[in-house]
Amino acid sequence: MTVILVADDDADIRDLVAFKLEQAGFEVIAVEDGQSAVEQARIRQPTLAVLDVSMPGLSGIEVCRMLRSEPATAGILIIMLTARVQEQDVEGGFNAGADDYVTKPFSPRELVSRVQALLTRART
């Protein structure tokens, strides 16, 4: 089963994303901050991570950079999920190594579709 890490400090969003991904057949690891995301990524080696940009401690951008810099986690697919919609924010996410960028408010159905599309592209 494909394992997906979801990191968001907003419990409602985290629970919604985890629920929708579980409904789509994924195993989900849900955490509330960036440090926990890094720790779980190192331990569990998820296939994909959905990271909120604005989290206490380590931001999603910092988590993304850390995961990309370590050989064991460099291959994890990363989707940034954020309310930051300015061009420089999106550019910053991609420059940090994100594979996709989804802005809040978002459609949970669209997020699941983007996860599935990213996983499909990665397998080919």
Image (tube, rainbow, N blue to C red):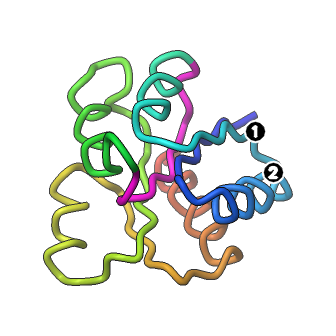
Spot occupied by residue 36 in the image (x, y as percentages of width and height): 49, 30
What span is colored magenta in the figure?
44-55
Secondary structure under the numbered disc 2 in the rendered image: helix
Q: Does residue 59 lie above or below 68 as drawn?
A: below
Question: In this figure, which residue is indicated by the disc labeled 2?
Answer: 22
**Residues under numbered marks 1 and 2 in contact, where contact means CB atoms less than 8 Å apart:** yes
Q: Quadrant of the N terminus?
A: top right
The residue positioned farthest toward the front in the image shown? 56
Tell me the amino acid under the disc marked 1: Glu
Residue at left 37%, top 33%?
75
Secondary structure of residue under mark 1: strand
Q: Residues within 10 Å of mark 2 (few under 14, many from 20)?
A: some
Q: Is residue 93 left or right of residue 109?
A: left
Q: Position of residue 42 (x, y in %)?
A: 45, 19
Q: Is residue 37 above or below residue 118?
A: above
Q: In the image shown, does 105 or 79 lie closer to the viewer?
A: 105
The residue pinned by badge 1 equals 27
